[in-house]
Image: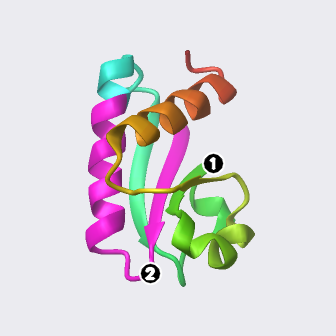
Amino acid sequence: MVRFGAACGSGLGSSFMVEMNIQSILRELGVSDKVTVQHYDLSSASPSDADVWFVGKDLEYSAGHLGDVRFLKSIIDMNELREKVTQACKDKGLI
């Protein structure tokens, strides 16, 4: 099982929205049964919590410690998120 994490400053609104959007994209890709998705606040997120992280570009300098981070120019741009989730799934051998 591959673990995706979404992180934001507070771990509430934006990371939860990104989590739900990732889950929707995973269903479209047919791999929702192979990936778990959780949202976190950046201050308590740990590299061991997820295999791939999705974080807004505004937090780029605060999220580097997480490991494999896919930075989003816009957290509301579904096309960008779809592209990055699809690439992450390819990188992890899911599609």
**Secondary structure under badge 1?**
loop
Point 68% across, 65% down: residue: 66
- Residue visible at 65% across and 61% down? 48
Image point 53% across, 38% down: which residue?
A: 84
CA gap, disc 1 and disc 2:
19 Å
Which element type, helix, strand or loop, lies under badge 2? loop
Which sits in the foreground, 82 or 27?
82
Residue under label 2, please give it.
Answer: 9
| Residue 16 horizontal/vertical position (percent) | 29, 62
Q: Quadrant of residue 38?
A: bottom left
User: Can you give x and y, in whole percent of width and height, for residue 37 in the image?
Assistant: 41, 48
User: Residue placed at 55% from the left, 15% from the top?
Assistant: 95
In screen coordinates, is 21 left or right of 95? left
Residue 36 as seen in the image, left or right of residue 76 = right
Residues in magenta, as a range = 1-25
User: Quarter-wise, where is residue 87 in the image?
Assistant: top right
Above or below, comparing residue 47 to residue 78 in the picture: below
Q: Which residue is mark 1?
A: 51
Q: Is residue 28 magenta?
A: no
